[in-house]
């Protein structure tokens, strides 16, 4: 599987995502500039964390208009895996591939720490190596991570099992229904505020995020049929 | 537009006095250097370049005391940042810089641009910044205004570093009334590079281009350098507009574009330098001076954010996120293409000329024509008067203060809640400490540790400054600042390499303050020699006063160490029940300037006693050998609050306890702050080897238990405390103070 990591102006977790895939998982991965228009030849695409366009206007609001986004949308429509973490998640909601929005944390502050999560749905292409309702701990590092959607949307997300990760124990940002990560209806687009790519090496304190990438990589073709 | 003063009017009306240029300096410039009266623009350039901030004219004689070479040092002071060899063709690059005055006035932008400025110093050397540290000294949190300043400063540091994607992995935050009117914000940045990419701030080669890259120039921060070289008073509150505004997104683009040129197109570049204090004039004049070149700039070509800027304003603006490059003739277009990709300006604003003149054109007219060296090299060094403060002479005859401890357990609980000692999580959780996924040890330990990706090496780093000891005994206090930093680095299992510093003092025209500066630098320099940690970069921040009251002299040491094997990083927390607990170093009655003195008497007094630096260095070196051999489970340096606080901290975030026989110590000595001590835990099977190496310098004081209780038997007291409860007090102290409605 060949994976693209998109680099927007202001992306800064692109290295983290790339190295998790390249150095740790030995996957076939390449950086792709936001100025490119095509993702031909790639089987999956990942949107890294960071501050694309300085978070000016609204986190992710400008990145959604970059050249590469139509190609990302095309991949999502084709059922290929699309993954966004942190700013990547914010961009995915801004561009409409995922419902809802990420608001300023209710503390009004940036927060960087490791938080406990519950794997709510282990039937996705991203989570099949986790146990059902498994507790894991992943780092978060964001100022705008408070997930918001209207009640109807939230109910629909739950009914369709689109909520994949939930904050367990404490809610660090005020997300509704403790939502930390969701997929689209088809299940091939995952957005999450926590950083699994920061938890793939014991040297750095945790390998809890490793199985997310392995779930994706160890399935051969991960294309999701409609 | 207001007409600028004529040279004669300047001579008569002396506006330069307001720009911190003295009459003697002005006369020297007119009579000796130029042989004519300088015009308005030239006078402005001189006042900025001859400010202490740019020229170090006051502190230079003292700075010469510092050692700045050893076999690992590739670049010492004088460039953007110092560079140290870490083997395998790699180098670590680091520097610290103060942004005290801007942060005092406008904490958020002051702190943010402090971080931005130091990052540019690092990447101008050709290195990628990989970690940030800070050293923050605030007034007391009981003052609601100070709470706002603390919040703003922390947010500023966080917002800039987080957006840049550079982890903030270590630092210190202390509180003392002496910083109430003048807070200290020192930012340090550490970068990594291949030695082949090393750059210099140098402009040479007749006809080569001087290119301006990055953000446009506005009127912000004009005279920031001179602003930093004068003290605060309520009367000159209007001068406080000299604070710049930061744009970390712009800086992120600038970083990527500069590193792309440096690493991929070294043949295009002659030199590169950050436009820091005193903006275009300092960067261009210093580059020309370094290259022994002449330079001609056309200011009409400088990208400008505001209309009708004068030459003086353009040259002195401290707008952020700008760099100056000297580019080989013919590659201007190539370079522009790289910057175009990042949507950044890259404009040729001038050329290198033969000769040694610094010539500026504005609106088609020549507005400056002076020798380059008159700005950079001819600055009059100022001899300063020195006088030992009476408080010290007086204290030498007084008996030393020793606390009377009636309840050692309560004293420990109280100390853990002192804001300087209490948990700083509420601050450092606002900093991204993990981005770039190389942080092995983040904030909250003695030192932060990064792995060097692709190798087995690691880098350990810390910042330390304790103004209280320096205030009471500048020379010994200076030594202690270095020893404390070295202890932090060694506690992580790393070998100290070199240091950077920020020298934060009051008005050096006060002979007592200059004496403090001189003595403390002497102390630091001596300690640097003992520990073989040369000073490779740094900065001086004088005039830290408010309404005539100076801060404690606060030299900050930023130290970087090398971890030879990243798998042998030593944690600062106890690891396993059954491990032996050793106290390294002797404990004495050292309470002058200690946290317990401040807590119990509300102030500090007395004489900080000298200590045997060579001896401390000797056993720390042996301790490091044991760590590198894998014989040590954990190590924590003893600092504020002494042994009692260090023991508690060693147990926090674990589920372990300790049972300790400290019958050779009094209850008071549990809180003594004798320098050069660590608390170390060692697995039983390694204990014999460890004891053999450390000899009398390690004292077995007990063992790690699995009860989560801290049990210590002292000469005249018993301590038996539940660690969970202690940790709760320690964790909640600052959040509780921040929430106060008073």
Image (cartoon, rainbow, N blue to C red):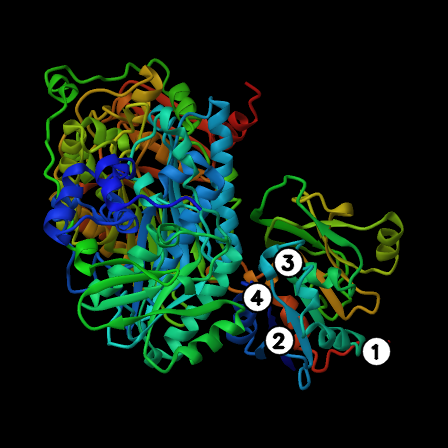
The residue carrying pointer 2 sits among few (fewer than 14), some (14 to 19) or many (20 or more) residues within 10 Å by Cα, namely some
Q: Nearer the viewer, residue A147 or B616?
A: A147
Residue occupying image coordinates x 35% and y 54%:
B315
Task: Assign a secondary structure to mark 4.
Answer: loop
Mark 4 near mark 3, Cβ–Cβ under 8 Å? no
Q: Which residue is mark 1?
A: A225
Q: Which residue is mark 4?
A: A9
Give how far apart the Cα atoms at labels 4 and 3 are.
Answer: 15 Å
Q: Which residue is mark 3?
A: A86
Give how far apart the Cα atoms at labels 4 and 1 are.
Answer: 33 Å
Same-chain check, marks 2 and 1: yes
Give how far apart the Cα atoms at labels 3 and 1 are.
Answer: 26 Å
* Residue B378 falls left or right of residue B663: left
Residue B510 vertical placement versus A77 (above, below) = above
Same-chain check, marks 2 and 3: yes
Where is residue B601 shown, x and y percent of the image? 31, 15
Q: Nearer the viewer, mark 2 or mark 3?
A: 2
Same-chain check, marks 4 and 2: yes
Task: Assign a secondary structure to mark 2.
Answer: loop
In the rendered structure, which disc, 2 or 3, sits on the residue that comes first in sequence? 2
Residue occupying image coordinates x 14% and y 39%:
B24
Where is residue B284 shown, x and y percent of the image? 29, 61
């Amino acid at each position: 599987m060949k994976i693209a990591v998109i680099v927007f102006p202001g992306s800064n977790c692109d290295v983290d995502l790339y190295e998790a895939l390249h150095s740790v998982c030995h996957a076939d991965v390449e950086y792709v500039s936001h100025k490119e228009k095509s993702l031909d030849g790639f089987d999956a695409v990942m949107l890294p964390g960071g501050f694309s366009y300085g978070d000016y206007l609204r986190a992710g609001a400008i990145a959604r208009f970059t050249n590469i986004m139509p190609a990302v949308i095309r991949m999502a429509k084709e059922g290929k895996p699309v993954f966004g973490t942190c700013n990547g998640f914010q961009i995915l909601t801004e561009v409409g591939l995922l419902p809802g929005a990420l608001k300023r944390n209710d503390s009004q502050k940036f927060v960087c720490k490791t938080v406990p999560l519950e794997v709510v749905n282990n039937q996705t292409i991203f989570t099949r190596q986790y146990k059902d309702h498994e507790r894991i701990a992943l780092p978060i590092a964001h100022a705008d991570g408070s997930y918001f959607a209207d009640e109807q949307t939230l109910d629909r997300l739950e009914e369709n099992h689109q909520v994949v990760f939930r904050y367990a124990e404490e809610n660090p940002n005020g997300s509704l229904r403790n939502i930390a990560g969701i997929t689209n209806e088809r299940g091939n687009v995952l957005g999450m505020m926590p950083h699994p790519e920061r938890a793939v090496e014991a040297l750095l304190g945790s390998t809890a995020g490793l199985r997310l990438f392995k779930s994706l990589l160890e399935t051969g073709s991960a294309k999701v049929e409609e | 537009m207001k007409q600028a003063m004529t040279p004669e009017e300047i001579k008569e009306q002396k506006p330069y006095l307001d720009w911190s240029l003295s009459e003697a300096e002005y006369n020297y410039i007119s009579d000796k250097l130029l042989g004519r009266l300088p015009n308005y623009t030239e006078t402005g350039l001189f006042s900025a370049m001859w400010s202490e901030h740019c020229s170090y004219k006051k502190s230079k004689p003292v700075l010469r005391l510092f050692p700045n070479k050893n076999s690992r040092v590739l670049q010492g002071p004088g460039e953007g940042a110092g560079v140290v060899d870490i083997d395998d063709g790699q180098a670590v690059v680091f520097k610290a810089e103060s942004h005290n005055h801007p942060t005092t006035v406008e904490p958020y932008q002051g702190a943010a641009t402090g971080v931005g400025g130091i990052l540019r110093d690092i990447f101008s050397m050709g290195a990628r910044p990989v970690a940030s540290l800070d050293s923050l000294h605030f007034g007391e949190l009981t003052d609601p205004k100070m709470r706002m300043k603390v919040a703003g400063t922390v947010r500023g540091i966080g917002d800039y570093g987080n957006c840049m994607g550079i982890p903030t992995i270590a630092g210190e935050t202390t509180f003392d009334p002496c910083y109430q009117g003048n807070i200290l914000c020192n930012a340090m940045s550490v970068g990594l590079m291949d030695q082949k990419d090393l750059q210099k701030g140098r402009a040479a080669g007749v006809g080569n281009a001087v290119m301006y890259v990055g953000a446009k120039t506005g009127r912000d921060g004009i005279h920031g350098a001179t602003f930093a070289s004068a003290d605060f008073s309520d009367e000159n509150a209007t001068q406080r507009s000299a604070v710049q505004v930061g744009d970390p997104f712009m800086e992120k683009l600038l970083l990527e574009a500069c590193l792309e040129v440096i690493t991929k197109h070294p043949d295009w570049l002659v030199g590169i330098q950050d436009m820091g204090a005193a903006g275009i004039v300092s960067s261009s004049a210093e580059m020309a001076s370094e290259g022994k070149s002449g330079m001609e700039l056309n200011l009409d070509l400088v990208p400008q954010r505001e209309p009708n800027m004068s030459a003086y304003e353009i040259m002195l603006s401290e707008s952020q996120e700008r760099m100056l490059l000297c580019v080989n003739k013919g590659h201007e277009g190539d370079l522009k293409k790289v910057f175009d990709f990042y949507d950044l300006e890259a404009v040729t604003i001038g050329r290198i000329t033969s000769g040694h003149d610094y010539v500026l054109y504005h609106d088609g007219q020549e507005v400056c024509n002076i020798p380059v060296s008159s700005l950079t090299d001819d600055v009059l060094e100022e001899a300063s008067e020195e006088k030992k403060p009476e408080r010290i002479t007086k204290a030498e005859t007084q008996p030393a203060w020793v606390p009377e401890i009636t309840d050692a357990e309560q004293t420990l609980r109280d100390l853990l809640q002192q804001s300087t000692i209490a948990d700083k999580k509420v601050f450092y959780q606002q900093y991204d400490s993990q981005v770039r996924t190389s942080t092995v040890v983040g904030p909250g330990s003695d030192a932060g540790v990064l792995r060097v990706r692709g190798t087995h090496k690691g880098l350990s780093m810390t910042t330390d400054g304790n103004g209280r000891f320096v205030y009471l005994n500048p020379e010994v206090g200076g030594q202690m600042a270095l020893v404390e930093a070295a202890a932090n680095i060694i506690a992580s299992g790393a070998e100290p390499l070199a240091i950077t510093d920020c020298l934060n003092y009051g008005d050096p025209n006060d002979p007592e303050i200059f004496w403090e500066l001189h003595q403390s630098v002497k102390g630091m320099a001596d300690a640097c020699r003992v520990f073989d940690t040369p000073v490779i970069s740094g900065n001086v921040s004088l005039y830290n006063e408010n309404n005539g009251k100076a801060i404690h002299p606060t030299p900050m040491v930023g130290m970087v160490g090398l971890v030879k094997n990243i798998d042998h990083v030593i944690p600062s927390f106890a690891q396993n029940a059954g491990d032996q607990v050793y106290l390294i170093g002797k404990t004495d009655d050292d309470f002058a300037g200690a946290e317990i003195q401040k807590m119990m008497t509300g102030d500090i007094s007395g004489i900080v006693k000298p200590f045997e630096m060579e001896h401390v260095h000797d056993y720390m070196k042996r301790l490091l050998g044991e760590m590198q051999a894998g014989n040590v489970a954990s190590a924590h340096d003893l600092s504020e609050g002494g042994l009692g606080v260090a023991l508690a901290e060693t147990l926090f975030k674990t589920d372990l306890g300790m049972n300790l026989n400290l019958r050779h110590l009094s209850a008071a000595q549990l809180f003594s702050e004798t320098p050069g001590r660590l608390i170390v835990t060692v697995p039983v099977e390694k204990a014999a080897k460890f004891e053999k190496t450390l000899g009398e310098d390690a004292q077995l004081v007990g063992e790690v238990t699995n009860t989560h209780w801290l049990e210590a038997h002292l000469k005249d007291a018993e301590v038996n405390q539940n660690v969970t409860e202690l940790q709760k007090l320690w964790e909640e102290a600052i959040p509780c103070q921040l929430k106060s409605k008073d």
